[in-house]
Image: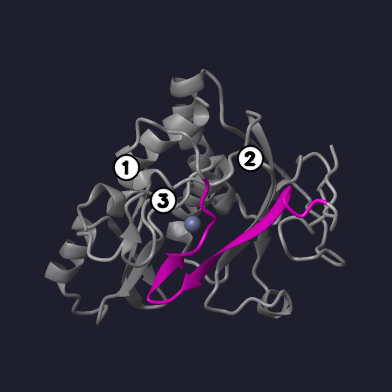
Amino acid sequence: MRFFLTQAAPRLVNRFSCVLILVSSFALTGCAKFGLDCPNVATDQKSSFMAPAREFPLQIRADDRFTETERESIRQAVALWNEHGQRVMGQDVFAVQFAPVGTLAGDKLDGCGLADREGSRGFVLWREDASSQWSSFGFESRTPAITLRCHAGEDLIKQTVLINTGLIQPVQLSSIVLHELGHTIGLGHSCVEGSGADSYKGCTGINREHPYRIAVMYPSLWVRSVPSATSPDFDQIDGYLKSGGTVFATSGSVATAEVKSSLRDNDLERASCVLSL
Ligand SMILES: [Zn+2]
């Protein structure tokens, strides 16, 4: 199936991009809202949806430049979504295949302008680690990943997630893929930046145990350095671990990074709605 972006049908096709911005934490910012009819979700989550994919299992073509370790992280994320898909609709949500994804030469870097990739039905997970290439796309080094979406009417038609593996901590790759795949099925963030609205809770002021804060679809992931590798502050590390962190070492120093290795109640609840539509 081919879709054309034409001036004649401006209401049919919308383009959205969701940018991940690297600050002291990842901010997985700004995705389109969409009004799905999910009567069982909380009132302040009514506007927390995006145009969903409709055909399952959705074939995702993942860049064969992902290393074996990275592939394992991607497979873990896919397996978690598939487990939920089996519970809700008796089938897998995603099927992932590692294959060449070609180049982006000549493609327009918006969701609808990207060429379809053979065998993917347009769903691509792209790996990039060259900073020159990344900047040639127009992305900053503070932006480790970007999701480009294209939907026609209420259906997501294609989506490309570009991940700059040179800008993220390997320990967080699976959490990031889990989050992006959530967008693919139609989940927006668990809360919206700022103070929000009645139909979409704002992230400002929610505490760290809040169900929307611990959700995979929360819009940020944090990374913290521990002051000294030789005399780490164990209380501080312990605090990080209690709030979902994993300790890792990088060239002589120690850091902790937030990892979300399972789907949380809020993710499961909203996903149950979109998967059963
Ligand atoms: Zn996001």
In front of the other: 152 or 135? 152
Chain part drawn in magenta: 9-34
At 48% across and 64% down in the image, what residue appears? 29
Instruction: Provide the residue designation for mark 3.
Output: 217
Local SS, label 2:
loop
Q: Is residue 264 above or below residue 15?
A: above
Q: Badge 2 is on which residue?
A: 154
CA–CA distance in space, label 3 to label 2: 21 Å
Q: Residue at x 38, y 65 (%)?
A: 193
Residue flagged by tag 2: what amino acid is it? Glu
Q: Which residue is mark 1?
A: 43
Question: At x 39% / y 49%, what residue is drawn?
Answer: 216
Whether label 2 touches label 1, CB < 8 Å: no
Image location (x, y in percent) of residue 242 = 19, 56
Could you classify mark 3 by the number of other residues whose Cα lies within 10 Å: few (under 14), some (14-19), or many (20 or more)? many
Q: Residue furthest top?
A: 90
**30 drawn magenta:** yes
Q: Which circle's residue, 1 or 3, is located before the other in the chain?
A: 1
Q: State the SS at label 3.
A: loop
Q: Quadrant of the N terminus?
A: top right
Number of other residues with Cα within 10 Å of mark 2, as a class: few under 14, some 14 to 19, many 20 or more = some
How many numbered dots are placed on residues in this image?
3
Q: How is the image coloured?
A: one colour
Q: As drawn, is 226 to the left or to the right of 189?
A: left
Nearer the N terminus, badge 2 or badge 1? 1
